[in-house]
Image: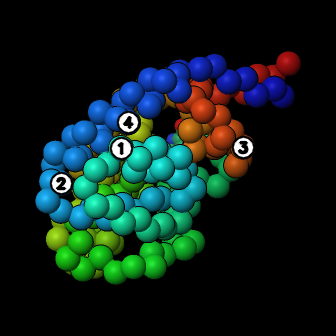
Amino acid sequence: MREEINVLIKQEDIVARVKELAEQINHDYEGKTLHLICILKGSVFFTCELAKYIKVPVTIDFMSVSSYGNAMTSSGSITINQDLTMNLEGRDVLIVEDIVDSGRTLAYLAHMLEKRGPASLHICTLLDKPQCRISEVDVAYTGFVIDDLFVVGFGLDYAQKYRNLPYIGVLEIKED
Ligand code: IMP
Ligand code: MG
């Protein structure tokens, strides 16, 4: 078995799109302090890139959730491995996610975090696979809409590997 990765979105295209998202966010949150919630581990790279171009005051917190295990298909159950360290009351919260697939993770998270009393709560995702949606999620900012492909890089993993790739690539498992 051989893992083959083909580039889907180049690094420069990711950075250019992230800058556009940041501009939109700067406009929408003018005069406010933005509280970013980075969903570990996948959205670390995206959160860092995005935060660099946000001009309104930013605070960042982290949360770790698992929904995938090591497989390429969604497990359907979500586990909170590590909760936030800051409260959300009165904050303008933006959940930063790597990819929305079935939507189960974000539907669950948004519902859970909404109960903590944020002033506002929105979702920003680098990638969206709308063809795979099972649970409805309201995504305010989307980097790229992609087909039903399994992708790695820029934070996204396959069995914890490939997060460090500076581009988004399609992973194929070849049986040689
Ligand atoms: P959902 O709950 O099905 O929307 O799954 C979202 C999570 O599954 C993401 O945060 C990723 O961690 C993982 N995931 C979904 N699709 C992919 C993919 O193509 N590559 C890597 N991870 C993925
Ligand atoms: Mg994730």
Residue carrying label 4: 18
Please identify the quadrant where the N terminus is shown: top right
Which quadrant would residue 122 be assigned to in this image?
bottom left
| Residue in the image at 30% along x and 76% along y | 88
Q: Helix, strand or loop at disc 1?
A: loop
Residue carrying label 2: 29
Residue carrying label 1: 53
Q: In terms of sequence position, does the residue under pointer 4 or pointer 1 come before the other? A: 4
Alpha carbons under labels 4 and 1: distance apart? 8 Å
Residue type, numbered disc 2: Tyr
In the image, residue 20 sits, relative to residue 125, either above or below, namely: above
Q: Nearer the viewer, residue 31 or 153?
A: 31
Q: In terms of sequence position, does the residue under pointer 1 or pointer 3 come before the other? A: 1
Q: Helix, strand or loop at disc 2?
A: loop
Residue type, numbered disc 1: Tyr
Count how many numbered circles sit on residues in the image: 4
| Label 4 with label 1: CB-CB less than 8 Å | yes
Q: Where in the figure is residue 5, as x and y percent of width and height?
A: 68, 24
Q: Is residue 49 visible?
A: yes
In the image, which is nearer the foreground, mark 4 or mark 3? Answer: 4
Q: Where in the figure is residue 61, as x and y percent of width and height?
A: 43, 68
Neighbours of disc 4 within 10 Å: few (<14), some (14-19), many (20+): many
Residue type, numbered disc 4: Val
Q: In terms of sequence position, does the residue under pointer 1 or pointer 2 come before the other? A: 2
Q: In this rendering, would 126 be left or right of 156?
A: left
| Residue in the image at 65% along x and 34% along y | 165
Residue carrying label 3: 161
